Image (spheres, rainbow, N blue to C red):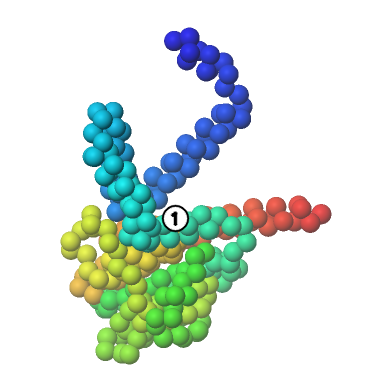
C-alpha cells in the first residue's frame, strides 16, 4: 500500500502526459484493427506470450524454446501476411498531414453543384435498377486504382455518369473514380473486402465498395442492380437502403467536416504569415 502511495506522489506532469500518449496510441491502434484479421492476430500473440511465460515459470525448457523461436519467426510472418492492415495504418497516419488537396476543397458553389450532379445520376440509376459503383476520392490518392481502368478526365455530370453505367457498354463494369469535380477514370478494379463478418447477401459491388473504403478515406456509393437500393461505404462500414435525401445529407456532412478543417488551416497559415 505504501509502495502505491509513493508511486502516486512521485508522478509528475510529464509522466501523466506520457501515460496519456501511450493510452491514446493504444486506443487508435485498437480502432484501426477492430473487426479485422489483425484483431484475431493480437489475441493469438497474447496467448503465445502467456504460454511462453508460463512454460518458463514451470521450467518447461523445450516448450519455452519452441515458443520463443515461434515468436521470432512470427514477426516476419506478420509483416508479410498482414501487409494490407499495416498499409491501412500507415495511410491513416499519413492522412493527418496539414497540406492536402481533396474532393472537398473546391469552392462551395462548385462543390454543391458536383454533389447535385452525383445525386441526380444515382437517383436515375436507382429508378432504372442499373448497377453502379462511384468512388469519391478524398485525401488518400487512388492512382493505383485509376490505372486499372480507362482514363476519362471529364467534368462530373449526371448524364455522363449515367451513360457510363448503361448495361452492355464498354465502361459499365467496374467503378468510376471522382476527384474534385473531375471523373478521373471508369471501369476500375477495386479490392474486395476480406471482412468475414459481412452479410453473405452482399454482392461484388458492395464488397468492393467496402474494400476500397477500408484501404482509403474515400466515400463509395453503390447502386444495386437487383433492387435499385442505394448504399454508401465509408471507413469500412456500409450504410444501406438510403434514399436520395439521406445520400445528399451524408455527402454534405462529409464536406462540412473537411471544410471546417480547411478553414482552420487557412486561418493558421494566415496568422503565421503576418
Query: Total of numbered circles in the picture?
Result: 1
Q: Is 260 positioned to the left or the right of 152 in the image? A: right
Q: Secondary structure at mark 1?
A: helix
Q: Is 136 positioned to the left or the right of 80 in the image? A: right
Q: Can residue 155 be seen by looking at this rendering?
A: yes
Q: Is residue 144 above or below residue 163?
A: above
Q: Is 4 positioned to the left or the right of 259 in the image? A: left
Q: Is residue 150 above or below residue 78?
A: below
Q: Residue 6, position in %: x, y? A: 53, 14
Determine the residue positioned at 32% across, 84% down. 172
Determine the residue positioned at 28% across, 28% down. 57
Occupied quadrant, residue 169 = bottom left
* Residue bearing the label numbered 1: 89
Determine the residue positioned at 32% across, 43% down. 68
Q: Point out the residue furthest to the left here.
A: 200
Q: Can residue 247 be seen by looking at this rendering?
A: no
Q: Is 104 positioned to the left or the right of 160 in the image? A: right
Occupied quadrant, residue 129 = bottom left
Quadrant, the C terminus: bottom right
Quadrant, the N terminus: top left
Task: Out of 81 and 260, give the one closest to the viewer.
Answer: 81
Q: Residue 41, position in %: x, y? A: 30, 49
Q: Residues within 10 Å of mark 1 (few under 14, many from 20)?
A: some
Q: Is residue 24 above or below residue 147?
A: above
Determine the residue positioned at 47% across, 15% down. 4
Q: Residue 216, position in %: x, y? A: 43, 63
Q: Point out the residue furthest to the front here.
A: 61
Q: Residue 268, position in %: x, y? A: 70, 52
Task: Out of 243 and 191, give the one closest to the viewer.
Answer: 191
Q: Point out the residue furthest to the right here.
A: 274
Amino acid at each position: 500500500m505504501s509502495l502505491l502511495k509513493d508511486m502516486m506522489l512521485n508522478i509528475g506532469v510529464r509522466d501523466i502526459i506520457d501515460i496519456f500518449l501511450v493510452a491514446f496510441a493504444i486506443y487508435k491502434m485498437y480502432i484501426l484493427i477492430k473487426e479485422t484479421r489483425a484483431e484475431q492476430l493480437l489475441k493469438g500473440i497474447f496467448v503465445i506470450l502467456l504460454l511462453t511465460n508460463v512454460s518458463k515459470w514451470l521450467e518447461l525448457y523445450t516448450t519455452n524454446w519452441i515458443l520463443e523461436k515461434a515468436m521470432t519467426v512470427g514477426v516476419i510472418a506478420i509483416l508479410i501476411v498482414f501487409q494490407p492492415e499495416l498499409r491501412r495504418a500507415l495511410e491513416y497516419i499519413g492522412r493527418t498531414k496539414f497540406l492536402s488537396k481533396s474532393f472537398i476543397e473546391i469552392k462551395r458553389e462548385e462543390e454543391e453543384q458536383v454533389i447535385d450532379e452525383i445525386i441526380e445520376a444515382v437517383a436515375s440509376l436507382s429508378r432504372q435498377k442499373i448497377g453502379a459503383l462511384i468512388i469519391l476520392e478524398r485525401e488518400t490518392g487512388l492512382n493505383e486504382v485509376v490505372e486499372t481502368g480507362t482514363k476519362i478526365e471529364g467534368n462530373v455530370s449526371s448524364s455522363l455518369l449515367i451513360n457510363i453505367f448503361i448495361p452492355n457498354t464498354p465502361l459499365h463494369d467496374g467503378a468510376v473514380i471522382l476527384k474534385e469535380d473531375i471523373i478521373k477514370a471508369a471501369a476500375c478494379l477495386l479490392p474486395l473486402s476480406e471482412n468475414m463478418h459481412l452479410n453473405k447477401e452482399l454482392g461484388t459491388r458492395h464488397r468492393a465498395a467496402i474494400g476500397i473504403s477500408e484501404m482509403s478515406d474515400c466515400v463509395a456509393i453503390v447502386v444495386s442492380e437487383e433492387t435499385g437500393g442505394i448504399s454508401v461505404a465509408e471507413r469500412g462500414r456500409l450504410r444501406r437502403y438510403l434514399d436520395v435525401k439521406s445520400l445528399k445529407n451524408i455527402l454534405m456532412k462529409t464536406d462540412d467536416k473537411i471544410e471546417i478543417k480547411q478553414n482552420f488551416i487557412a486561418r493558421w497559415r494566415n496568422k503565421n504569415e503576418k
